């Protein structure tokens, strides 16, 4: 049996629609759900709300909407990263006006980017210099001289 709060809310709403009184609902739920029944005050409060016409779903809450699924936000993060490879998640979050954790989610889950290497060797062999130069000529100019 599902003894979650949402399931018990549905039972309260159903029984109040059938015309049961809050005290009867409380005693029935206590019998059915055993130790996991809701507190008496909670049952009475929800009973009053359903009597007043409120439905079982939560009311919308104030706050920022989730911007992760927004394709404009995702493309903006990608564009900022392509402009400046050394930009931090905090700088992106300030620029785009989203949470730092959201930026991390976009970078790692949506784009599939990851930190490749935090160590830049000081002494490269000629083969390594050539390989790096072929990957990104602008970033390796200092090692070729």
Image: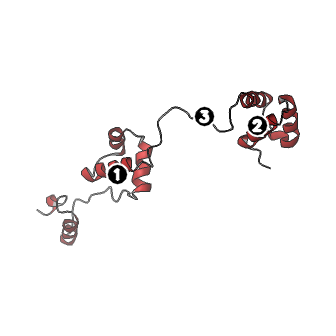
To which quarter of the image does residue 27 belong?
top right
Which of discs 2 and 1 lies nearer the camera? The answer is 2
Gap in Å between the C-alphas at discs 2 and 1? 44 Å
To which quarter of the image does residue 30 belong?
top right
Residue at the left extreme? 145
Q: Position of residue 126 (x, y in %)?
A: 18, 70
Tag 1 residue? 75
Residue 47 horizontal side relative to residue 111, left or right: right
Gap in Å between the C-alphas at discs 2 and 3? 16 Å
Residue in view at x 35 percent, y 59 percent: 116
Image height check: is 68 above or below 127?
A: above
Camera-side residue of 133 and 49: 49
The C terminus: image quadrant: bottom left
Q: Residues within 10 Å of mark 2 (few under 14, many from 20)?
A: many
Residue 8 horizontal side relative to residue 101, left or right: right
Q: Are marks 1 and 3 in contact (CB under 8 Å)?
A: no
Tag 2 residue? 13
**Colour theme:** secondary structure
To which quarter of the image does residue 118 belong?
bottom left
């Amino acid at each position: 049996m599902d003894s979650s709060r949402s399931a018990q809310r549905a039972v309260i709403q159903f029984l109040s629609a059938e015309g049961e009184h809050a005290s009867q609902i409380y005693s029935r739920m206590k019998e059915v759900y055993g130790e996991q029944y809701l507190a008496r005050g909670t049952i009475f409060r929800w009973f009053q709300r359903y009597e007043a016409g409120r439905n079982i779903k939560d009311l919308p809450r104030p706050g920022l909407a989730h911007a992760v699924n927004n394709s404009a936000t995702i493309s903006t993060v990608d564009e900022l990263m392509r402009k400046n490879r050394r930009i931090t998640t905090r700088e992106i979050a300030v620029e785009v006006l989203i949470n730092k954790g959201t930026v991390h989610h976009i970078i790692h889950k949506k784009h599939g980017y990851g930190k490749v290497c935090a160590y830049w060797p000081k002494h490269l062999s000629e083969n390594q210099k050539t390989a790096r130069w072929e990957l990104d000529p602008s970033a390796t100019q200092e090692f070729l001289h």
